[in-house]
């Protein structure tokens, strides 16, 4: 079969690789009908995530048709259409019982690697380094899905791939980012990053009752999408405006009630601090550039919430802990826990009708084909 494979920093190509096979009674083989490129795949492409190996198959946002199931999979059968969430979860450990599927204690066969870097291991993830299991990803014609009786979401025939593909990652991730803000009616939410997750974070903040949604980015077409499709009331282009001054003006000097970092470890910026972070990251003295995170913490109102949906891989410098403590900020983060989050965001979007995956800010326009379509 054909698959998108990683061959080093900025080196990705489509190659012929072996077809996947059932290895465990809880596995399923899925024929991919639609897949997507996540913003976090950039970190793999640019070489910032460790433990990648040449030939690794990329992709953790995909859906398709079940071709074969292991003997222990009773809730799926050949021919079912499913969306596959990016976290691989066993369904039975302590974390899974508490519905924290992205923290599954059994699905990462390389947990010892993650424990050395992070203290404890999260779940295994499709196509996202050997640190997180070394699983082949979904930018391929076929995928082996472990614990297929736990994560996948069945898709009814009346829904197209376009309408449900984003339940694999970016919609639940954006929704959870907004949900972690504990939004109350009338509040102001600022979102750093107008990429896919940032767009869904803004749309979800609107859905959850925010009165004013401010989106910050440097690309005009993404800021336009935030206004026309995601419900942003204001935008800030940080190439043209000072973010601090603009936010003070928009919030009467108070700052947003909640701030969402939907950027992560490769944030862009200006000035000495940006140059400092670029130099340290290039010299491998710092793994991540936390420019958006620092800004979100600084700009949040006293007693507000900072929600982190952007991916961070390791260690950052000059983290403003004094700001968090002395201004009583709440910092929340995590990968989407899925099943539970997917149900909540799907239910909320149906109830609000104004936000649908079929007319989402970054809606995929591919159609079902015999071979998978890769959407940016």
Image: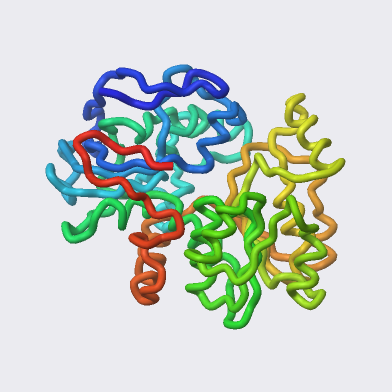
Q: Which residue is most to the left?
A: 78
Q: Nearer the viewer, residue 185 or 312?
A: 185
Residue under the point 44% across and 46% down: 104
Q: Total marks drawn?
A: 0
Residue 343 spot, x, y in % from top left: 36, 64
Q: Which residue is most to the right?
A: 272
- The answer to whether 170 appears left or right of 258 in the picture is left
As drawn, 31 above or below 104: above
Q: Nearer the viewer, residue 114 or 374?
A: 374
Q: Nearer the viewer, residue 219 or 114?
A: 219
As drawn, 282 above or below 247: above
Look at the image and tell me whether residue 92 can be seen. Answer: no
The image quarter containing residue 61 is: top left
The scheme the figure's colours follow is rainbow
Residue 79 spot, x, y in % from top left: 13, 45
The image quarter containing residue 337 is: bottom left
Look at the image and tell me whether residue 247 can be seen. Answer: yes
Residue 247 spot, x, y in % from top left: 76, 67
Q: Which residue is most to the bottom?
A: 186
- The answer to whether 136 appears left or right of 29 in the picture is right
Residue 291 spot, x, y in % from top left: 74, 47
As drawn, 81 above or below 25: below
| Quadrant placement of the C terminus | top left
| Quadrant placement of the N terminus | top left
- The answer to whether 163 appears left or right of 181 in the picture is left
Residue under the point 18% across and 41% down: 66
Residue under the point 65% across and 53% down: 217
């Amino acid at each position: 079969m054909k698959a998108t494979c990683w061959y080093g920093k900025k080196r990705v190509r489509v190659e012929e690789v072996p077809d996947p096979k059932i290895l465990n009674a809880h596995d399923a083989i899925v024929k991919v009908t639609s897949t997507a490129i996540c913003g976090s795949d950039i970190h793999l492409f640019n070489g910032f995530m460790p433990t990648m190996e040449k030939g690794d198959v990329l992709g953790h946002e995909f859906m398709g048709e079940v071709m074969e199931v292991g003997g222990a999979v009773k809730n799926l059968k050949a021919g079912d259409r499913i969306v596959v969430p990016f976290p691989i979860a066993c369904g039975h450990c302590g974390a899974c019982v508490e519905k924290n599927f992205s923290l599954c204690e059994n699905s990462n066969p390389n947990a010892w690697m993650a424990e050395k870097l992070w203290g404890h291991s999260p779940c295994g993830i499709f196509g996202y380094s050997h640190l997180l299991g070394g699983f082949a990803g979904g930018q391929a014609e076929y995928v082996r899905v472990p614990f297929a009786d736990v994560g996948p979401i069945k898709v009814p025939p009346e829904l197209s791939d376009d309408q449900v593909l984003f339940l694999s990652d970016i919609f639940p991730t954006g929704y959870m980012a907004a949900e972690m803000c504990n939004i109350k009616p009338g509040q102001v939410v600022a979102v750093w990053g107008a990429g896919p997750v940032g767009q869904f974070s803004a749309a979800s903040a609107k859905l959850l009752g925010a009165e004013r949604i401010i989106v910050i980015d440097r690309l005009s077409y993404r800021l336009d999408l935030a206004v026309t499709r995601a419900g942003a009331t204001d935008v800030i282009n940080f190439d043209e405006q000072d973010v601090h001054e603009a936010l003070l003006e928009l919030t009467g000097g108070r700052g947003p009630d909640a701030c969402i970092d939907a950027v992560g470890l490769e944030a862009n910026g200006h000035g000495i601090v940006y140059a400092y972070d670029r130099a340290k990251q290039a010299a491998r003295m710092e793994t991540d550039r936390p420019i958006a995170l620092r800004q979100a913490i600084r700009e949040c109102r006293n007693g507000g919430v900072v929600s982190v949906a952007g991916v961070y891989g390791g260690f950052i410098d000059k983290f403003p802990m004094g700001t968090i403590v002395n201004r009583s900020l709440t910092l929340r983060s995590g990968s989407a826990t899925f099943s539970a989050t997917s149900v909540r965001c799907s239910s909320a979007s149906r109830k609000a009708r104004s936000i649908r995956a079929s007319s989402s800010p970054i809606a995929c326009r591919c159609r079902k084909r015999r071979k998978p379509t890769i959407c940016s």
